[in-house]
Image (cartoon, grey):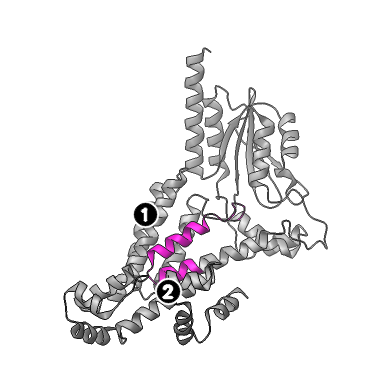
Amino acid sequence: MGAPGQAVAAGRAEAVLEAIGEVLGCTATLSSDLDANLSAFERDHCLDPRIQPAFTARSLLQMVQAMPAEVIHEIEEPLGMAAAVARSKDRLLLIGPYTHHAMYPETVPELVRAQALPRSHAELYRLYRTRYPIVDAEYIYRGAAAALRATGGRDALGALRQVSALGGSIAPGSDDAPQSATFDVIAERYRLEQAFMDAVADGSTSEALETLERLSTIPSTITYLTTPFLGTTILRIMARVAAQRGGVPGVTIDAISQEYAQRLHRVGHSADPRRSASFNSQMVSAFCRAVRRHRRLGYPPTVRQAHDEIELHLSSPVSTSALAASIGVSESTLTRRFKEATGMSVTQYVAERRCSRAARLLATTSRSVRDIAAFVGYEDANYFVKVFRKAYGTTPTEYRARRAT
């Protein structure tokens, strides 16, 4: 085949692999560099070589070199994960990992017992397992067969040849985590998830999206946000619960949730991380707007305007007189109507909102108290400490220390 024909074939194969990835939700690669391809697979998808040797580059290479060409093999290993491999000419097709089975509450403890894993691995395994899609073997076979045809090869067997990998347990009694930093990272993830839900419950779009951005930087060994469809689904559930905490009626939450669940089918399997991130941002923003709308629902127009101005300029100096002037009413009118609607004076409301934002920053960042004070609108850090103590019954430093324990 000449150069133009080879280019067309390569383009066709690339399109098929991309389609497999989007439809099945798992990685599909085709490479003539076996060592690099299998090393990348181990690096990205092997939980730990000590408990998942079937997913190491060395084991996979031994199998690939021994297996017949153009026969699609599916490797199932003891942790419940699988991958499909096939050789076509000098190239290796690799699809996965994926799993065939849902993970129920009893799955992890049963597997820990069956494989004699240390209990410290249970949470790590649970987080690892949820990164990957549940895919029926028939769809894996069809995808692999289509990829072989796109490369000019064929499916020599007409079915999956299934291979069960045996072994893979750590010796009983070893109770050390496979990576010393892993559980610190897990703790950070849970802390950021709580901060995210707090922000949505508060209707703070900017803080929710900022926290979501930080969540997306958690190492890929445990994050779900990099997993197509699954990450957005989990995020939608978290936002629903948070919006309910924020007081949004169930019927409103359900309407937003249904809209984005339906839209998710169009973008949920996208291989483009920017597209997924944009979709997530839109969804989270919708829930935050619902919280803000609900809070303002019973307020008269004057108070709604004042509320919006305060939220928009919370970090800047806020006075009742300047606020009244910006919305076109007298100071006395605003003072009376704001108190009637919210039960607080403008000054009290501003202090409450600033302290709420500061509390979240104390719990989720390492910024100094002085920096946080300035960020939420208090140039005098000592005065900020006084206001915060009145709101929370403790100093900012003590509050941070308690949330860290």
- 301 relative to 157, above or below: below
> Is residue 219 in the magenta section?
yes
The tag on residue 262 is 1
Q: Quadrant of residue 261?
A: bottom left
Above/below status of 328 relative to 338: above
Residue, x 55% and y 31% (percent of image)?
145
Identity, as a three-letter code, of the amino acid under mark 1: Gln
Q: Is residue 386 left or right of residue 337?
A: right
Q: Which label was assigned to residue 379?
A: 2
Examine the rendering and report whether any part of residue 217 can be seen. yes
- Predominant secondary structure, magenta span: helix
Q: Give the residue at the far top of this rendering.
A: 2
**Residue 74 picture quarter:** top right
- Quadrant for the C terminus, please: bottom right
Q: How many marks?
A: 2
Percent from the top left, x then y, of residue 267?
A: 41, 47
Stretch in magenta: 195-222
- 38 shown above or below 76: above
Residue 106 image position (x, y, % from top left): 64, 65
Which of discs 1 and 2 lies nearer the camera? The answer is 2
Q: Position of residue 389 (x, y in %)?
A: 49, 85
Q: Amino acid at mark 2?
A: Glu
Circle 1 sits in a helix, a strand or a loop, which is it?
Answer: helix
| Residue shown at the point (39%, 63%) measured from the top left | 206
